[in-house]
Amino acid sequence: MGEITTTQENTKLTKKDITKSMWIYYAGAELSNSYERLQSLVFCASMTPILKKLYTTDEELSAALKRHLVFFNTEGILGAIIQGIVISMEEQKSNGESITDDAITGIKTGLMGPVAGMGDAIIWAAVMPIIFSIFLPFASNGSALGGIMPLILYPLVTIVISYYLIHNGYTLGKKSIVSLLHGGRMKNIIFTANVIGLTMMGALSASYITLTTPLEFSFSGGSTIVMQEVLDLIVPGLLPLSAVFIIYAYLKKKGPHYTKILLTVVIVSIITSLLGIF
């Protein structure tokens, strides 16, 4: 495989072409998954306008489309950087550079795991909790902003991230991800995002999960022990914290069976409420 350069001597693509590809992938990354190939369908769809502009013969276009129908799966927002790199490689290939089909597929396959790890840590464990936590107080006070603003801000933030990544990935080619991976920077980014995300989730758990017990124990001398007061003296918020850890332990042991968890929480809440326990 020849050296992949980052300069575009015979540029065929415009900024508009690359942005159009980003929009297609952004809109369908989490919607078009198939059990066999996951995101390959939407990735191929996002590359189709690019490939049609780069390759003039049916044989070249057909081969290019088949390249991007192989298995692919990564995080939908940060995955834009893979798009940018692949677009750059496809353009270089169409300009006569010695880039093989396996090189393009290899870049996609090699990057989809690390990028997915970064995307899950940054987007789903940090960006989303932060945005929602900002507006949860508005929602709890009955303000419509609590429901409307996250639906506006989250797309805006993620679109800006995708736009920046796809264009920088295209400009820098394969070196864009190499510079990110160099020196363990990716590990530091993931660790930092995880810390922020866990901190936000801890704050949300403490602030928005309410669980108390009305249990009281009366003794012959006329004294009464209020169980909730005793628990608050031991650890304030002990019951909500216990509920979070019980659900977390179930997730670790049994996996993300969210429907079962929700139904169990509802059933346990109803039963313990009727019994006067919680």
Image: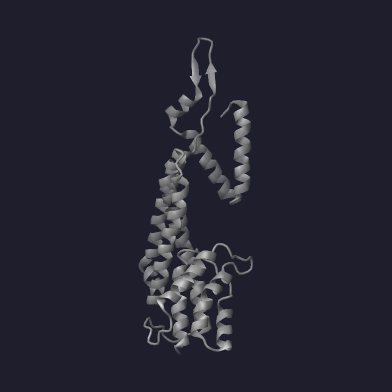
Residue 53 x/y as whole percent = 49, 83
Front-most of residues 37 and 54? 54
Residue 140 location in percent, x, y? 46, 39
Would you place residue 146 above or below residue 159 in this image? Answer: above
* Above or below 54: residue 212: above
Extreme residue toward the top, this view: 221
Examine the image and state in which quarter residue 175 appears: bottom left
Q: Where 226 falls versus 39 (above or below)?
A: above
Residue 84 appears in view = no
Q: Residue at x 39, y 67 (%)?
A: 164
**Colour scheme employed for the rendering of this structure:** one colour
Q: Residue at x 59, y 25 (%)?
A: 276
The residue lying furthest to the front in this view is 144
Instruction: Identify which residue, 51 or 251, lies in the foreground.
Output: 51
Relative image position of residue 247 (x, y in whole percent): 55, 43
Residue in the picture at 53% in, 45% down: 248
Quadrant into which the C terminus falls = top right
- Residue 70 visible in the picture: yes
Q: Is residue 239 above or below residue 110?
A: above
The total of numbered circles placed on residues is 0
Which residue is at the front of the view, 242 or 112? 112
Kindly indicate the quadrant of the structure image that contains residue 12: bottom left
261 vs 159, left or right, is: right
> Residue 149: x, y in percent?
44, 50
